[in-house]
Image (spheres, rainbow, N blue to C red):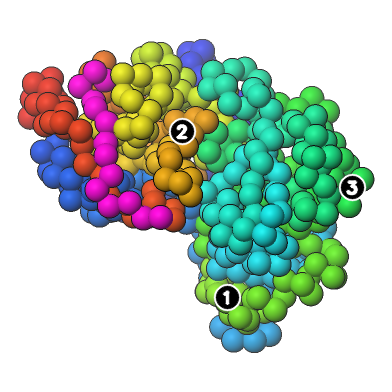
């Protein structure tokens, strides 16, 4: 797909599919968007979807299914126990990951909960290339802590380094020596690090990390939720892997991990999740939590129809033309924003296009949640819903102090096979306009702040009348246009 060239010389991503089912969208006027944002407490999670034009909040559970996935849902075996659907999924997991055992769960954070319950004790430390919100919350809830050991380049928003999700081996070695292997239940590697711009790690780095951990008797856990993007980047950016198939890269990655878990709301274009492993002792240690919290061992809280779709989706993930569209559309959007001067994370990663809110709104105080303010402003400017990935996504220290996030990003997710080129260009246009008028945008303050995962349902208010001023400027520049 990436080798297709236009006679004009223009480089644009080419969809390797056709659209056969559509869903009507609604674009409310700018005044209605401001009202909707106020009603949602300036939290894009609390917007009603009917008020959203382009939903770039997440790629979780909103990717378009293929015709083969939809067809597979009609042959699901709807049995509580011993479902043939489960055994088809288990066989596909074993084939692709080269593992012996599989435990189903309703989504990725359920896997994180079970992992933490099974292995984390008070005082334990879990080294990671970078944390995800729920992975960290489950560990800290049980008295553990997280050490982020991503390479320094990973926190540089503007870079050409291809694998900014790599773990720093020197830092990992020092962490093991300082903490003691007995206090490290596992090392967690996140494919396509979510909070620093969807940045991948290399197969070489993963292999070296696993070797170092295993030498100390420490387990390696792979969060494979964004595996498909990481696979694509290894195939296209890592010279030693350019002649390997996606299937071969998958097995090489999984060979380094003692436990592989994933959210199928991302990996496999369905809804669900699970954990795979080959060590029977690990399997037995986690197995009892499935019927206790999720469901029986052959459905784990998932719909069997989703399980059938997941089986097909996992196989489709082995097709480079399927998994390439996401990264290529993201790269296209990032490049178009760069042409307009908008600061974005480079190189473009997976999951979505990440705008550097710290630079975009350099005049907004770090404690006034610049990325959340930018998310509100982008929705008002264009009806585009993005997600804050910065300080708001962190949680306060026990003494109430606010830790400033390493990166302050607005994530504009591009769910697979969902948006058209004109829709992406519309979002680029409105964000470009907003950048020209960025001095109008101010910060936010909390009015309702939950103690845990506050970014999901906390409510905020604008500092001053900047949203009213933004609406006035929009009407002045666009007239009667929505």
Q: CB under 8 Å between callouts 3 and 2?
A: no
Residue 103: image x %, image y %? 69, 70
Residue placed under numbered mark 2 in the picture: 404
Q: Nearer the viewer, mark 1 or mark 2?
A: 2
How many numbered discs, if any? 3
Residue 451: image x %, image y %? 40, 55
Residue at left offset 75%, top offset 48%: 187
In the rendered structure, does residue 25 fall within the stretch colored magenta? no
Quarter of the image for the C terminus: give it: top left
Residue placed under numbered mark 1 in the picture: 294
> Marks 1 and 2, Cα distance to the nearest angstrom?
35 Å
Residue at left offset 36%, top offset 40%: 386
Q: Secondary structure at mark 3?
A: loop
Looking at the image, residue 423 sits to the left or right of residue 60; the answer is left
Q: Residue furthest front?
A: 399
Answer few, some or many: residues within 10 Å of disc 2's Cα (few below 14, many 20 plus, some between 14 and 19): some
Quarter of the image for the N terminus: give it: top right
* Stretch in magenta: 438-451
Residue sitting nearer the eye, 267 or 437: 437
In the rendered structure, does residue 439 fall within the stretch colored magenta? yes
> Marks 3 and 1, Cα distance to the nearest angstrom?
33 Å
Residue placed under numbered mark 3 in the picture: 216
Looking at the image, residue 198 sits to the left or right of residue 239; the answer is left
Query: Does 446 appear above or below 201?
Result: below
Answer few, some or many: residues within 10 Å of disc 1's Cα (few below 14, many 20 plus, some between 14 and 19): some
Query: Does 243 appear above or below 160?
Result: below
Residue 405: image x %, image y %? 48, 34
Q: CB under 8 Å between callouts 3 and 1?
A: no
């Amino acid at each position: 797909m990436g080798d297709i060239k236009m006679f004009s010389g223009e480089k644009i991503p080419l969809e390797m599919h056709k659209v056969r089912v559509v869903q009507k969208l609604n674009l409310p006027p700018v005044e209605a968007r401001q009202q909707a944002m106020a009603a949602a407490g300036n939290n894009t999670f609390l917007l009603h979807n009917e008020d959203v034009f382009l939903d770039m909040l997440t790629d979780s559970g909103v990717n378009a299914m293929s015709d083969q996935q939809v067809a597979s849902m009609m042959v699901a075996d709807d049995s509580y126990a011993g479902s043939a659907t489960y055994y088809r999924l288990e066989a596909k997991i074993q084939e692709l990951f080269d593992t012996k055992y599989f435990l189903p769960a309703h989504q990725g954070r359920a896997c994180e909960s079970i992992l933490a319950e099974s292995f984390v004790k008070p005082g334990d430390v879990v080294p990671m290339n970078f944390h995800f919100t729920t992975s960290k919350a489950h560990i800290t809830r049980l008295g553990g802590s997280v050490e982020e050991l991503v390479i320094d380049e990973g926190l540089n928003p503007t870079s050409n380094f291809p694998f900014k999700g790599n773990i720093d081996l020197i830092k990992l070695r020092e962490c093991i020596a300082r903490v003691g292997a007995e206090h490290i239940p596992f090392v967690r590697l996140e494919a396509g690090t979510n909070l620093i711009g969807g940045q991948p790690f290399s197969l070489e780095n993963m292999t070296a990390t696993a070797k170092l951990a295993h030498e100390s008797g420490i387990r390696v856990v792979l969060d494979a939720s964004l595996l498909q993007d990481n696979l694509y980047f290894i195939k296209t950016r890592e010279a030693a892997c350019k002649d390997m198939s996606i299937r071969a890269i998958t097995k090489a990655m999984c060979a380094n991990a003692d436990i592989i878990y994933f959210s199928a709301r991302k990996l496999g274009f369905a809804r669900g999740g699970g954990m795979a492993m080959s060590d029977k002792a690990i399997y037995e240690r986690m197995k009892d939590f499935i019927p206790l919290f999720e469901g029986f061992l052959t459905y784990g809280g998932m719909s069997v129809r989703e399980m059938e779709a997941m089986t097909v989706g996992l196989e489709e993930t082995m097709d480079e033309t399927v998994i390439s569209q996401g990264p290529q559309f993201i790269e296209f959007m990032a490049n178009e924003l760069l042409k307009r001067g908008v600061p974005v994370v480079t190189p473009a990663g997976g999951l979505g296009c990440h705008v550097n809110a710290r630079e975009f709104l350099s005049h907004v105080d770090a404690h006034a949640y610049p990325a959340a303010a930018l998310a509100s402003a982008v929705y008002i400017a264009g009806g585009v819903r993005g997600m804050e990935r910065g300080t708001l996504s962190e949680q306060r220290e026990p003494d109430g102090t606010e830790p400033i996030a390493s990166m302050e990003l607005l994530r504009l997710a591009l769910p697979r096979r969902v948006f058209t080129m004109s829709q992406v260009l519309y979002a680029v246009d409105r964000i470009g306009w907003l950048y020209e008028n960025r001095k109008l945008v101010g910060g936010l303050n909390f009015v309702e702040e939950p103690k845990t995962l506050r970014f999901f349902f906390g409510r905020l208010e604008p500092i001053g009348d900047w949203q009213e001023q933004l609406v006035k400027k929009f009407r002045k520049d666009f007239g009667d246009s929505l």
